[in-house]
Amino acid sequence: MAVDKKRIAEILASARKQGRLGLLEHEAKQVLAAWGVPVARTELAGDAAEAVRIARELRYPVVMKIASPDIVHKSDAGGVRVGLSSELEVRQAFDEIVANARAYKPDANILGVVVQEYLPQAMEVIIGTLQDPSFGATVMFGLGGVWVEVLKDVSFRLAPLDAGDAREMIQEIKGHPVLMGVRGEPQADIGALIDILQKVGRLAHEFPGIAEMDLNPVFLFERGKGAIAIDARIILGEGAHG
Ligand code: ADP
Ligand code: MG
């Protein structure tokens, strides 16, 4: 897919214009998609009828999540429903997700829900970026879940990365053998992972106004089957533009 820098600049500018430094999940995924990073197709629905229309278009099953600039950790707010397979389930999920979010944070500005395609379970990895004040765009990589939360098993490299840098990042983490397949599990699609690491690094390098990116999780399938960002967050820097 062709890179669309203009589209990315527009999405970033539009959030800033609305006084927001945090992009919503569907906006962050639009930025990534315009840069050629594979993402789960995701659209914003303002009401239940729109959610049903989008679900039909994406095909069941779908996933729905709360869409609010004031709710960052959507699961914590009871704001994620996975594997919805009918119009009735989508309608019920819409009401439940919004009610849960209101209970969790009564003053949250709720825009609706995002509806997205459901992806089969896979290995979960996380890919992030930050802007180091002295060295600039930096990429972080780790395995998801306990690997990052408990063991802090992550690696860092300055962007832009060549394929060798990306490969080193992957090899450096303690959990690396898991990616190569343990106990008869198939090897993960390392090529797809290298591609995303490089692309994300290049995006942060070329758009220094992106203070932080967080792709968490990225579903990583077995060799030849690719990888895809399931959740994404982008935070813009104060003052900085571009
Ligand atoms: P949070 O804001 O809580 O991080 P996520 O969007 O990461 O919300 O969703 C929480 C979990 O739900 C993910 O880690 C993943 O396991 C599952 N999930 C989310 N979206 C999808 C999807 N499109 N397909 C399959 N599973 C999903
Ligand atoms: Mg997440």
Image (spheres, rainbow, N blue to C red):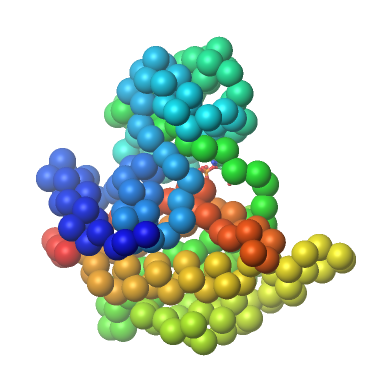
What residue sits 49% from the left and 64% below the top? 127
Given residues 139 and 40, the one toward you in this image is: 40
What residue sits 59% from the left and 43% below the top? 119
Could you tell whether 222 is left or right of 194 in the image? Answer: right
User: Farthest front residue?
Assistant: 1
Work out whether residue 77 can be spotted: no
Q: Position of residue 101 (x, y in %)?
A: 44, 26
Q: Position of residue 57 (x, y in %)?
A: 45, 28
Residue 99 lies, with reference to residue 151, above or below; the image says above
What is the quadrant of residue 131 in the picture? Answer: bottom left
What residue sits 29% from the left and 62% below the top? 3
Residue 14 lies, with reference to residue 157, above or below; the image says above
Residue 84 lies, with reference to residue 127, above or below; the image says above
Could you tell whether 8 is left or right of 188 in the image? Answer: left
Given residues 176 and 29, the one toward you in this image is: 29
Q: Identify the image quadrant of the N terminus.
A: bottom left
